[in-house]
Amino acid sequence: MSAEVFITVSDVMEYLFCPRFIYFMYCLGIPQHEEKRYKVLKGRELHDAREKVNKSYIRKKLQCVRKDIAVYLVSRKYCLKGEVDEVLFLEDGTAAPLDYKFAEFKDKVFRTHKYQSALYGLMIADNYGLKVNRGFVCYTRSNHLVKEVKLSDKDFERAIATVNEVLDIIQKGFYPEATKYKARCVDCTYRNICV
Ligand code: SF4
């Protein structure tokens, strides 16, 4: 694996939506002319969300002693980069990513949100040299509910395997399987060239 190829956390999210996105974006160089599906909170929205999830809640409920805000993480070890909304440093000596989502909480943490926490977790562990065994997701459309996401070794292994699958497509240039969910093809940018 070449250390010079870096993919972003959002590339992995695109891959989970449909593996062919990676092929079209990286191997053919055709960008998506669409807003990213995984909406990232920016500026004012994020500021307001932070205000709502107030400091004492983060300190007491999440046992957080310190935090870094808007951290751009790069990990050579995992060929991965991306900006995490917050890195929390917890009382037990571990660290955890906190990600704000412009979304409602619906019964459980989405698979993609869990992957995202695991990917940021890998980079936090690599950059800060601290153990990561959980992440937090704040759902701004559910009254800023903060949910804990437990991260096991298996979750990290799965996240690394997925990163390697993405790198494999980019480096070997093979045409991956289409998504199993045909409904996703309906308004896809690539539907005219995807066979
Ligand atoms: S048309 Fe369907 S299979 Fe092809 S890239 Fe789009 S979502 Fe994937």
Image: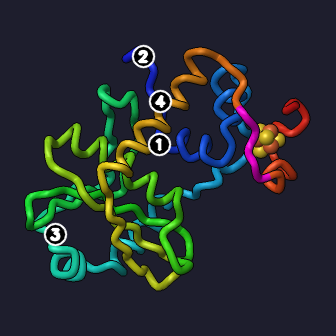
Tell me the element at label 1. helix
- Amino acid on which the number 3 mark rests in the picture: Cys
Cα distance between the residues tagged 4 and 1: 12 Å
Q: Tag 2 or tag 4, which sits nearer the N-term?
A: 2
Numbered label attached to residue 9: 1
The reply to whether residue 66 is visible in this rendering is yes
How crowded pointer 4 is (Cα within 10 Å; few <14, some 14-19, many 20+) is rated as some
Q: Are marks 4 and 2 in contact (CB under 8 Å)?
A: yes
Residue 3, how many percent across, how many down? 37, 17
The reply to whether residue 141 is visible in this rendering is no
Q: Are marks 3 and 2 in contact (CB under 8 Å)?
A: no
Cα distance between the residues tagged 4 and 2: 9 Å
Residue 191, how many percent across, how many down? 86, 39
The magenta-colored residue range is 177-181
Residue pointed to by mark 2: 1
- Amino acid on which the number 1 mark rests in the picture: Val
Q: How is the image coloured?
A: rainbow
